[in-house]
Image (cartoon, rainbow, N blue to C red):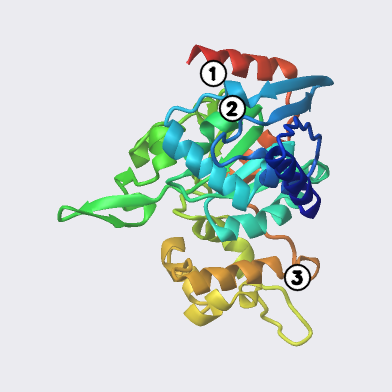
């Protein structure tokens, strides 16, 4: 970053003396890209993107990138990628999540479900649900295989007001990505019934949200985890100092609510609500001693998405994606 700043300074000084220089920089540095590649006025147009897919080199000229809402979307992407995640351009694959919990736990989940994916450069972007769709054009343009992990965000009409509720009481979703991009459904019933093929866009982008597991459907990652690990959390594992030890004792959330509630309360009522409770839950899960008590389960919707993401991208899929996007 210091290097490219010095280069820019030299070029700017030369221009003041009437010397105009054309400079080509090849780099794998996200710092150099954010400093010199993404321009306030020209946006991404100075970038030429090279990607190896199925033994072939794919070259992209950002002058051909088409964004529907050019002003707002381009400004958002420029700001986000400059300040946060310009390593997107150097990724093999991408995972977009909504919250900190997902972002922090995903590396562990990847090692559990698809350890081979650890050897690839997977960029994990934390993006609010209302903004995820703004990445559509650039992800399709780069032909990056992408998994979007999101929540249903159920709501019901309560006296003319939409309020959060358990999934079995939900009528619609407030999630903009689900409503306007993938799978373009707004009712909970429709989302539950969506076929796997309808969760995929342009063959390289897939959405993952809570699905039925053990007869229940969660509203969030935390709920889905409780459902997927209901039996495990309550299983008694004798320990030298605690004959009735249960894995749930490793979680401050369940200890504060009372372990007996695991048998009587729903996942909705057991899941953390405040940001501090969610943070504690995340760290409790990250530090859970699996070698001592056994392995916890990754929620079904995430494991299915990771298995899809781990499959190699073939050139034929990329070509089909390019043709599809050009037709649109």
- In the picture of the structure, the residue carrying the numbered disc 2 is 140
Horizontal side, residue 227 vs residue 184: left or right: right
Residue 253: image location, x then y, percent? 54, 75
Compared with 1, 57 (above or below) is above
At a point 48% along the width and 51% down the height, the residue shown is 128
At a point 67% along the width and 45% down the height, the residue shown is 34
Label 3 sits on a secondary structure element that is loop
Instruction: Look at the numbered discs 2 and 1 and tell me whether their residues touch, using CB distance below 8 Å.
Output: yes
Compared with 107, 44 (above or below) is above
- In the picture of the structure, the residue carrying the numbered disc 3 is 289
Question: Is residue 281 something that shows in the picture?
Answer: yes
Front position in the image: 104 or 114 = 104
Sequence order check: which comes first, mark 2 or mark 1? 2
Disc 2 and disc 1: Cα gap in Å? 8 Å
Foreground: disc 2 or disc 3? 2
Front position in the image: 8 or 201 = 8
Foreground: disc 1 or disc 3? 1
Mark 2 Cα shell of 10 Å, populated few (<14), some (14-19), many (≥20) = many
- In the picture of the structure, the residue carrying the numbered disc 1 is 325
Residue 113: image location, x then y, percent? 73, 46
Residue 285, picture quadrant: bottom right
Compared with 295, 14 (above or below) is above
At a point 74% along the width and 39% down the height, the residue shown is 90
């Amino acid at each position: 970053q210091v290097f490219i700043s010095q280069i820019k300074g030299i070029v700017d000084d030369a221009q003041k003396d009437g010397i105009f220089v054309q400079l080509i920089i090849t780099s794998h540095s996200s710092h150099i890209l954010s400093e010199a590649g993404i321009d306030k006025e020209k946006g991404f147009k100075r970038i030429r993107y090279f990607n190896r897919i199925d033994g072939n080199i794919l070259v992209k000229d950002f002058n051909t990138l088409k964004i529907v809402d050019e002003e707002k979307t381009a400004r958002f992407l420029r700001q986000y990628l400059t300040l946060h995640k310009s390593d997107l351009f150097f990724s093999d694959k991408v995972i977009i999540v909504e919250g900190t919990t997902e972002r922090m736990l995903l590396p562990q989940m990847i090692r559990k479900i698809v350890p081979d994916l650890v050897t690839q450069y997977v960029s994990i972007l934390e993006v609010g649900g209302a903004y995820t769709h703004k990445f559509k054009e650039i992800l399709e343009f780069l032909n990056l295989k992408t998994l979007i992990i999101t929540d249903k965000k159920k709501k019901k009409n309560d006296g003319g007001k939409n309020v959060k509720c358990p999934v079995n009481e939900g009528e619609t979703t407030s999630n903009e990505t689900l409503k306007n991009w993938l799978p373009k459904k707004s009712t909970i019933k429709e989302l539950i019934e969506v076929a796997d093929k309808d969760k995929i866009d342009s063959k390289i982008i897939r959405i993952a949200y809570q699905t039925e597991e053990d007869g229940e459907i969660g509203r969030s990652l935390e709920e889905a985890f409780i459902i997927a690990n209901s039996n495990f959390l309550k299983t008694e594992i004798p320990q030298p100092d605690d004959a009735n030890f249960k894995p749930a004792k490793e979680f401050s959330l369940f200890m504060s609510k009372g372990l007996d509630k695991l048998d009587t309360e729903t996942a909705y009522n057991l899941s953390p609500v405040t940001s501090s409770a969610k943070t504690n839950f995340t760290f409790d899960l990250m530090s859970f001693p699996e070698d001592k008590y056994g392995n916890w389960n990754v929620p079904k919707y995430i494991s299915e998405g990771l298995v899809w993401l781990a499959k190699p991208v073939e050139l034929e899929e990329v070509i089909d994606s390019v043709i599809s996007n050009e037709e649109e």
